[in-house]
Amino acid sequence: RFLGDIEDVSYELLLSRLAETDLGRRFRLRWAGLGAFPRATRATVLWLGLDRGEDALSALATTVDVAVDGAGFPPEDRPFNPHLTLSRLRPAEDVSVLVTSTPPFAIPMEVDRVTVYQSRLGSGGAAYRVLEEFPLPGEKRRGTIVGERTGRRFGGSLELCVFLGLQLLLREIRTLVV
């Protein structure tokens, strides 16, 4: 969930709300096929969807939204749509052949934390930095992707994301697509 520019006081309240919230236990999901927003024939976003774990991820997103709303941020105006953005397309393109002809990837992943990211837009796109992590309890499974905490001070926009080991996942997808 993108929060935009926020003040230090709001940020500290957000962290407090997340820390006191029962975020649930870690769970597994599986990335599957490609999709596009707003539609494949005129796509501005190419994404990877799920075929397992969507309910657990949606429940976690709802729990996080309640905590974020409780910290005084306005509610999200769009429904949660679990996906991983692979590319933003400017101008819009027809990716319908790619979406329909690419077989599902079936990439399993364990969701083991909620991460607060800072994003800064630059000439090469957004750069992300981990600010805070909230581990989900439960037994760690083999192959879990582990991130690294880099500090709490920030300036700029904040995004709240479920940690999904984006770099490893994208490397695996590039290998499968290329």
Image (cartoon, helix red, strand yellow):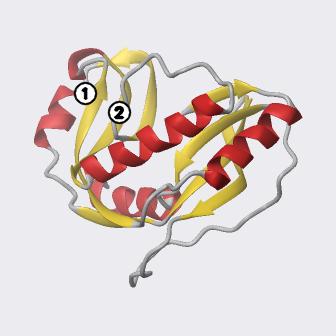
Image quarter where the N terminus lies is top right
Q: Which mark is residue 95?
A: 1
Q: Earlier in the sequence, mark 2 or mark 1?
A: 2
Residue 77 shown left or right of residue 178 in the figure: right
Query: In this rendering, is residue 153 above or below 7?
Result: below
Q: Closer to the observer: label 2 or label 1?
A: 2
Amino acid type for the residue under numbered disc 2: Leu
> Residue at (41%, 66%) from the top-left corner?
26
Q: Are marks 2 and 1 in contact (CB under 8 Å)?
A: yes
Callout 1 amino acid? Val
Q: Residue at x 22, y 17 (%)?
A: 41
Q: Is residue 156 left or right of residue 32?
A: right
Residue 131 versus residue 73 in the image, above or below: below
**Rendered location of residue 73, percent (x, y):** 65, 24
What numbered label is drawn on residue 46?
2
Q: Residues within 10 Å of mark 2 (few under 14, many from 20)?
A: many
- Taking depth in this image into account, of 156 and 57 the one nearest to the observer is 57
**Is the residue 21 above or below the residue 108 in the image?**
above
What residue is rendered at 25% in x and 27% in y?
Answer: 95
Q: Secondary structure at mark 2?
A: strand
**Residue 175: x and y, percent?**
35, 62
The residue at the point 66 percent across, 44 percent down is 17
